Image: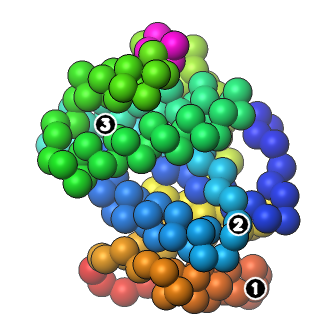
Amino acid sequence: MLLSKLTENEVAYYFDPVCPWTWKTSRWLVEAGRVLNFEIRWRPFSLTILNKGNVPTEYEEALIVSTKALRVITQMTVAEHNSDVFAFYTALGNAWFENGDDISVKVVEQILRDLKLQHYLDACEQEALDSQLAQIHNYAHQLGGEDTGSPILELRNGIGVYGPIFSEIPIDEEAGILFNSVRTLALDLRFSELKRHR
């Protein structure tokens, strides 16, 4: 495995940066981490790999951009530059989902420059990173299981769940309460699924 083990005070979040639902969940997790004082390991998950080439036409361009961003995230993750992943993903999410910027390689590259992370620019085109991305993705997908996608939340080494998905971002104490509820369910290996329509 390419990744270091989680400590008692860490969770891992596997995400595709192009997914708006995943973005909302990530902001909840940041809030929960602040309230409950735990650390988050940010790790890549690929909707392109998940869909095995069967990507609907309307999402093709966005997923091409996402794959390039995920190569950057993979390089950061393997190098254990977790703070760089967090800064990059936060800037991407704010640009794409809060400011309404185009989901484009141009935005990816500009963010790297703005964050003084331009040494990662070459990673966008490094297809050699795809095998490492796939390895991390496959590990995360096994945690969630079939018929799951982005995000995957790993609560303890080898124990994780898909989601949760929020329509609005819980904040402050509520974020911590909801995290503890998710963790309680996820760590009970009798628990399988909890879902309702959006």
Q: Residues within 10 Å of mark 2 (few under 14, many from 20)?
A: some
**Disc 1 on helix, strand or loop?**
loop
Q: Residues within 10 Å of mark 3 (few under 14, many from 20)?
A: many
> Within the magenta stretch, is there residue 121?
yes
Quadrant that contains the C terminus: bottom left
Dominant secondary structure of the residues highlighted in magenta in the image: helix
Which label was assigned to residue 63?
Answer: 3
Residue 16 located left or right of residue 152: left
Q: Which residue is mark 1?
A: 188
How far is the residue under mark 2 from the one under mark 1? 20 Å
> Within the magenta stretch, is there residue 11?
no
- Give whichever of discs 3 and 1 has the lower sequence position: 3
Residue 149 visible in the snapshot: no
Q: Is residue 70 above or below residue 118?
A: below
Q: What residue lies at 48% left-to-right and 81% top-to-bottom?
A: 172
**Which residues lie in the magenta part?**
119-123
